[in-house]
Amino acid sequence: MHETIIAKQIIDEANKHGKPTEITVEVGDLGHLPAHELEQCLKNLINCRIVVKNKKAVIKCSCGYKGEPKIIEKGHDLNIYECPTCKTPNPEILEGKDIKLVEVKTE
């Protein structure tokens, strides 16, 4: 159900630009839901081309590491990740936690 709410918000925003023929969404590796779930939900709710782009996550750890995390588990509203250098769980996320509407093509 969570993915339906997010998908409807994306569609509402896309509709502000006219009748969409293509919607491009960026989903972070550490976003609230897996990209494939959002893509399927969008396809069920709107009749246009859906493009989902993956955004790599970037973390900053207290050990000094800055880069991609080691994602241990990715699920619905649940991400378990760690620093690949020192194994600290859930360091600060700098990028890759958002879901964004990045482009709308209209008729």
Image (cartoon, rainbow, N blue to C red):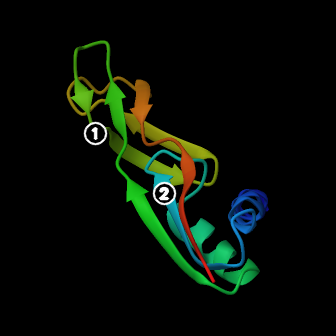
The answer to whether residue 22 is left or right of residue 19 is left
First in residue order: circle 1 vs circle 2: 2
The quadrant of the image that shows the C terminus is bottom right
Where residue 26 is drawn, which disc sits there? 2
**Image point 79% across, 58% down: which residue?**
5
Quarter of the picture containing the N terminus is bottom right
In-front residue for pair 45/3? 45
User: At which x and y percent is residue 62?
Assistant: 31, 12
- Above-or-below relation of 53 to 33: below
Q: Residue 85: x and y, percent?
A: 20, 27
User: Circle 2 — which element?
Assistant: strand
Taking the spot 24% from the left edge, 14% from the top edge, the residue there is 63
Name the one closer to the observer, 55 or 74: 55
Residue 57 lies, with reference to residue 90, above or below; the image says below
Task: Point out the residue furthest to the bottom here.
Answer: 47
Q: Which residue is mark 1?
A: 68
Q: Residues within 10 Å of mark 2 (few under 14, many from 20)?
A: some
- Picture quadrant where residue 14 is located: bottom right
**Image height of 66 relative to 22, above or below:** above
Residue 69 located left or right of residue 20: left
At x 66% / y 74%, what residue is drawn? 42
Q: Give how far across and how far down residue 104 sits, in percent.
A: 57, 68
Observer-nearest of 55 and 21: 21
Residue at x 29% of width, y 27% of height:
87
Amino acid type for the residue under numbered disc 2:
Glu
- Give the quarter of the image for residue 17: bottom right
Q: Determine whether the residue tagged by mark 1 lies in a helix, strand or loop.
A: loop
